[in-house]
Image: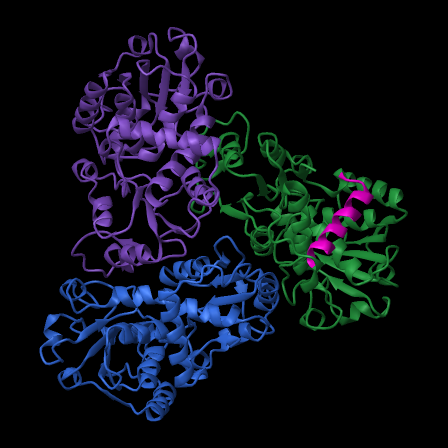
Chain colours: A purple, B green, C blue
Amino acid sequence: MNRFLDLADFSRDEIVDLLALAKRLEQHPEPRALAGKILGLLFFNPSLRTLSSFQVGMMRLGGSSFVITPGQGTWQLETRLGAVMNGAAAEHVREGLPVLASYADALGIRAFADGKNLAHDLAETSFNAMAAVVDKPLINMESATNHPCQALADWKTMDDLGIPQRGKFVLSWVNHPRITPLAVPCATVHMAAMRGMDVTVLRPEGYALPAQIMDKARAAAEASGGSLRETTDRAEALEGAQVIYAKEWGSTAHYGDATADAALRAGLADWSVCNQWFERTAPDCRLMHCLPVRRNVAVADEVLDGPRSIVQREAYNRLPAQMAVLHRLLA
Amino acid sequence: MNRFLDLADFSRDEIVDLLALAKRLEQHPEPRALAGKILGLLFFNPSLRTLSSFQVGMMRLGGSSFVITPGQGTWQLETRLGAVMNGAAAEHVREGLPVLASYADALGIRAFADGKNLAHDLAETSFNAMAAVVDKPLINMESATNHPCQALADWKTMDDLGIPQRGKFVLSWVNHPRITPLAVPCATVHMAAMRGMDVTVLRPEGYALPAQIMDKARAAAEASGGSLRETTDRAEALEGAQVIYAKEWGSTAHYGDATADAALRAGLADWSVCNQWFERTAPDCRLMHCLPVRRNVAVADEVLDGPRSIVQREAYNRLPAQMAVLHRLLA
Amino acid sequence: MNRFLDLADFSRDEIVDLLALAKRLEQHPEPRALAGKILGLLFFNPSLRTLSSFQVGMMRLGGSSFVITPGQGTWQLETRLGAVMNGAAAEHVREGLPVLASYADALGIRAFADGKNLAHDLAETSFNAMAAVVDKPLINMESATNHPCQALADWKTMDDLGIPQRGKFVLSWVNHPRITPLAVPCATVHMAAMRGMDVTVLRPEGYALPAQIMDKARAAAEASGGSLRETTDRAEALEGAQVIYAKEWGSTAHYGDATADAALRAGLADWSVCNQWFERTAPDCRLMHCLPVRRNVAVADEVLDGPRSIVQREAYNRLPAQMAVLHRLLA
């Protein structure tokens, strides 16, 4: 394994093996496994869990890491090929990334979507331009339309808690004050499909996930014995659900149009998960969310502070899941 | 010992033991004592000494650390319970802090006062809301009205230099271009009282320390055989002083009112320690300050660059003092 | 060796020895050489290579480091002696630097030129004010008019690639949207002269390097058997060149005058290295640049992406070169 960029690059068995390694490292720590290894962490965007769990993961395996944040202590970086660089960016990723790769044993990159052109973001144009010039093991720490580390941690969380492989998994759009990226919903729908679950994407009109993402997830579902469908009917979707995975994302019908998105969103304040959402679910239905979560906008306090919420376990599982990835890439 | 939040949580003997450990670690380094241990450092506010000395302390004991700075590379964090989070803060401390705690073996938190409501700040409302959701060893790296790490380092500094236990200790308000928090004066007056010193708080009208702080320190003084009083009379206060501890803080009479504070402060430019302040002190009277210090506003160059200043030793002592705390919490 | 501030502080033989150590550490890693040693890194200005390579260098030698960035997580620092500190800076370097030095085993400082007064910058007034209060090993990570770490890496790069000691080295001014500092050109001209090369400084009118820098480099050239001259004639300068070292810098004729510099610069857009520049050079002439480089402003894509460019190797060599410096200072 030389890159961890997308769950879809791996077979279901390979992911199951990776999760077994995560479990093993939890139970039998290997504090010298990555002695002398160095991970470079490049963050174009803010982070709490990813920033801390990757550093801690290296420490717990005996390695170390360094953090680079363009625009904050480091030059702004240009990603466009052929750019005449007379603007704010002082350095091109074609220089900066190979340099960082030459110092480190592996790199992780976080680079959110531009959010202007859906085809550009679905093609992972920026991330791929960077990946193309890195000749060391590489980790996607969240790109325009993917977040495989979150997906891996979420899969582990469901395994840990015995949520059935064929359980009903509802990925539901929830409200947020602003447009947020597609990375987590795209990664989540694929993960749940690949795990073999019966996946429902519940979202209002205008917020359908891109066909390319749905098709890819549907193929994964078929290969794993699961299913995938989408609906705008909340009552129907939640019926019998074993997981409600709440997530915010921007309108795909009006991609890159903040005004149109805001107009659509204005009528959607009730897309906020509260106890009532669980009235017709399975009795032990869980609430998942990748965090950060807007309390009382996306999910109510009563759910986040109640027994259904497993968001802390998801966040904690970032650590062992990523330690397994690092172990595979570097040990 | 599971938390280091306030000197007042410990008996005088316990603090004396902690300082003995600090001394022992200075003389007999233990470069593997915290091998494999990880400290998470959460800074809501700027820092130089705390930021560097905690990282170095972990390194010198064989452990490691990571730094999280909300609003700078990490999401802004909300502390208010029940908030409808449609503003700038993307994440609530009720999620963020348990996540960080789940990755680390201990956490340190720096969160300055809001500076709007004195009762709120004296109750340590924000810090306590965070402390309540952390189930790992926890260190107060400066809260609204406390700074126990600074206090511990200052106590050690006076011990190192043989400043008598019953010496006259004058905590004097000094000038500053803006309002600064109450944390250090509150921690300092308690520390000196607990050490058993004859403590005088010297401050202009409008800058009395809160009664709750003075009462708490007075009880500590009585238990340790020291004393505590306050005055606006500089000549009387400095007479025979063995320590002048210079510190800036905001008006408590006009707490949260920048305009009133500035008006009051306009007439107080001579509250700036210069050589003349030492004319009637003990001959070997020392100048203490927690740093950062505004040269020629709070303290004159002639004092900071002269032999009375022990500010460098105070700052250096942050390291062994905090190493003792870390050792107690984690070894 | 206790300080690494300027190549000119060392004899040519000492630098050659240091480069031999760099080579040795590349071939025979010493992963425990600096076990227990701590480097403090103080960055007043942005960085990618220096920030990451110094951290990695310590890790690869078994030591560790911490980073302090005034104004970003840390107080702004004042450097002026005698300042009445009622402005933005909360702390003076006379306090801050000795404190950091007391925690660490060595310090590195990056502090760019003020860019207002050439004599002040040539005298290294700010850097020297800081160096004067640091009593630990100290590294210049780029000051107003020097960048010895870059120079050392560049020298190593030419050795690695067999560029002859007496080869023709052309330091050429290139275009940039804004004024940039003199540090790299000053360090580069001295390095190439000290290596014994035939050095030509090619620059437009108004951009001559300061006489003080040229005189110092000329003395180094004479001692090493090299030569130094300057010209505005590009064709003549490039004839037979074995290295074109492209670098941006501000007008010295109008130092500190952004308007005059911009007016002069407006006519200089063709000072951008493209393939045509190599028509009369030696056949294997190389393109060097310290990075970050403005693509298609300072150097064209066709050169940076072609076989002449050795900028990646220069950047990589920061690591072994600085590891040699750290080894000398701390092992």
**Which residue occupies 87% across, 60% down?**
B236
**Secondary structure mostly seen in the magenta stretch:** helix
Q: Is residue B13 magenta?
A: yes
Picture quadrant where residue A197 is located = top left
Of residues B83 and C196, which is closer to you in this image? Answer: C196
Q: Position of residue A101 (x, y in %)?
A: 31, 54
Instruction: State the residue at coordinates (68%, 72%).
Output: B305
Residue A219, quarter of the rendered image? top left
Q: In which quarter of the image is the C terminus of chain A?
A: top left
Q: In this view, does C186 lie above or below A61?
A: below
Tell me: B195 left or right of A256.
Answer: right
Percent coordinates x, y for residue C247 in the rendering: 27, 73
Specify whether C282 is left or right of C79: left
Measured as percent of width and height from the top left, residue C186 is found at 35, 79
The answer, for residue C94, to whether it is visible in the render is yes
Q: Does the magenta stretch include residue B122?
A: no
Question: Does the rendering let one see residue C86?
Answer: no
Residue A136 located left or right of residue A303? left
Where is C17 relative to B158, above or below?
below
Q: What residue sits 56% from the left and 65% below the top?
A: C105
Q: In this view, does A188 lie above or below C38?
A: above
Q: Which is nearer the eye, C94 or A288?
A: A288
Q: What residue sits 29% from the left and 8% below the top?
A: A236
In this rendering, position of residue B322 left or right of residue A240: right
Q: Position of residue B304 (x, y in %)?
A: 69, 69
- Numbered range of the magenta stretch: B10-26
Query: Which quadrant does the N terminus of chain A fall into?
Result: top left
